[in-house]
Amino acid sequence: MDLIFQTRGLKLINRLFSPNKKAETAIPFYPQKPDFPGVKPISQPFERVTPEEVGVDSARVNEFINELISDKSVNLHGITLIRKGKIFFEADFGLYRSEIWHAAYSMSKTVVSIAICFMFEEGSLSPDDRIADLLDIGNIAKIGKGGITVKELLTMSTGISFNELGAVTENDWVKGFFESKTKFEAGEGFEYNSMNSYILSCIIKKVAGVGVNEYLEDKLWNPLGIDMHPWETCPKGIEKGGWGLYLRREDTAKLGVLIMNGGVWNGKRIISEKYLNLMIRRHRKCPAEYGGFDYGCHIWIGHSRKSFLLNGMFGQNVLGFRENGVIIASNGGNDEVFQQSPFFKIAEKHFGSANFKESLPRNKKAYKTLCKTAKKLCGEKTKKENSFARIKRERFLKEISGREYNILSKNRVSASLLPVTLRAIQNNYGTGINKISFLYENGALYTDFVSEDGVRRVVSGFEEGEYTKLDFGGEKYIVGSFARFGKNEDGVPVLTLNCAFCETASERVIKFYFSAQGKLRITFTERPGVRLFDKALEIVGAVSKNKLLSAAGKRDLDYLRYRIKATFSPEYTAEQKNKHLE
């Protein structure tokens, strides 16, 4: 199975980073992402207070936020600070909105762990139960794998090599897991692998008779007032476990408060103290690449102090400092898979070692400054235009309104408005863009991206963002967009669209360069981007020793780097339709 899995993985990487070819999936695509039903109030919302009311100086918070902003690698989408069960600061960044759910990515793992704690408490499961006794895996799989325990799944110590790449190369994930080779004997090492979480999700389904999401309805979601919590499923209809959960940021913060309070919520015990302590105890020492954290039971444990972390790739965090009670919940779109972001050092610097009093006197001046900082972060707006610049922008937009351009570039077959990262995660590639048209009306820009599978219209504002729901193969995404107009150093008119896929970590910047001859040059960039797929090079480098590169059709790493860059930052040329009739 490992040889098949690796070969499929390499072929997928090869196809994904071939800009002049339409991507071919290793397994059939099926819509996974849930459709956001609309904004609704948070149930059981936290009380909002000033920082001083919970013993924190507003000036400290302002310094913290400004330091995060100044480091562009952090790339936050939003942040919430809590102490004593009260929100003392919150801010949305750019086009992102806290009332819209956000992909939790690997924060989902901690929710699975909480579900397992409930099963330990009710006696339907124990840490030492063997998966061979819990799942129907067949006699062959039981040899060498059947002895793996629930605790070894929780502590990422199974040694199984079938990993997240299997989600887009194999339909039967349980089969892939048990037919995979092991890197070490179970319980003897640490290897972070989301498929361990998926197997736990399968165990919950088998033992409880319902999926993890339904199992938690009356045990976790309802008691905490978390009423929006969709969870993507595998091809077999079982929750992915290690990822796929969507939550609003205030609801993720509730999980942090629950853990900070020892499993108690509003005076009522939700999680057994015994099994919560098992969850947040250090079980595995982690290598340096995992940052300043070791591993508990599907939760990260701080090296240097009593802290815990729910972490999802690209900057999804609930970080709790147990010594002073501060909880930081954040969403982001950085290029980090694990805890390497400067976010953690900045958080540690400002809150990790601080001793806070019960409350502080009001500091009107510092609090006013902090409020200005929060307001400045919310909403992507163009620089304030003078009347002359606005007139020039209006004139240009009216000039291009109604124009349609045919894309000429050979690489248009792989063009998509959907970011590359999302295409890879969701196995959703669609068809290439072949036409683009513009309409300017009532102060908003409407840009149509035309593909064989339909027309997707992005609405962009100039003073503030506009929001659209776009359908990609049955998966619907909320896209926030604002536009800017200017000229480059050569005097060429440039129209820029900033597009945030607000339920995810991904953002795209699309630039249109207009020539006088009816030609159009289009560039795409995105974040998270190229750095994320450095991991793909590591996979290729490791597998090359097994002489699988020829089977995958790969030439060399330098060429692959070139192809990755071309895939993440493509350029297209287009020609105005019926230019000769003007």
Image: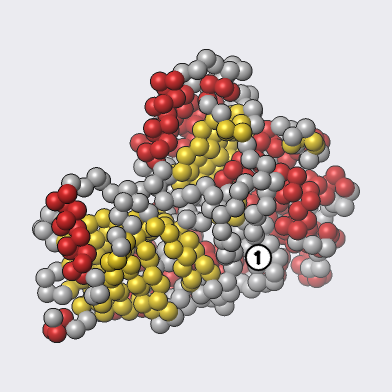
Quadrant location, the C terminus: bottom left
Horizontal and vertical percent position of residue 115? 76, 50
User: Is residue 317 depicted above or below 27 in this figure?
Assistant: above
Q: Position of residue 102 (x, y in %)?
A: 54, 53
Residue 213 visible in this rendered orientation of the protein? yes
Q: Nearer the viewer, residue 382 or 255?
A: 382
Task: Please name the residue that numbered disc 1 is placed on.
Answer: 233
The amino acid beneath tag 1 is Thr
Which residue sits at x=32%, y=79%?
434
Whether residue 169 is visible here, answered yes or no, is no
Q: Residue at x 37, y 54 (%)?
A: 465
From the top left corner, tell me how far across and down residue 326 is, in percent. 59, 29
Q: Residue 263, position in %: x, y?
A: 75, 36
In the rendered image, which quarter is residue 520 located in? bottom left
Q: Secondary structure at mark 1?
A: loop
Viewer-closest of 221 and 20: 221
Q: Nearer the viewer, residue 240 or 575?
A: 575
Identify whether 549 is placed above or below 505.
Answer: below
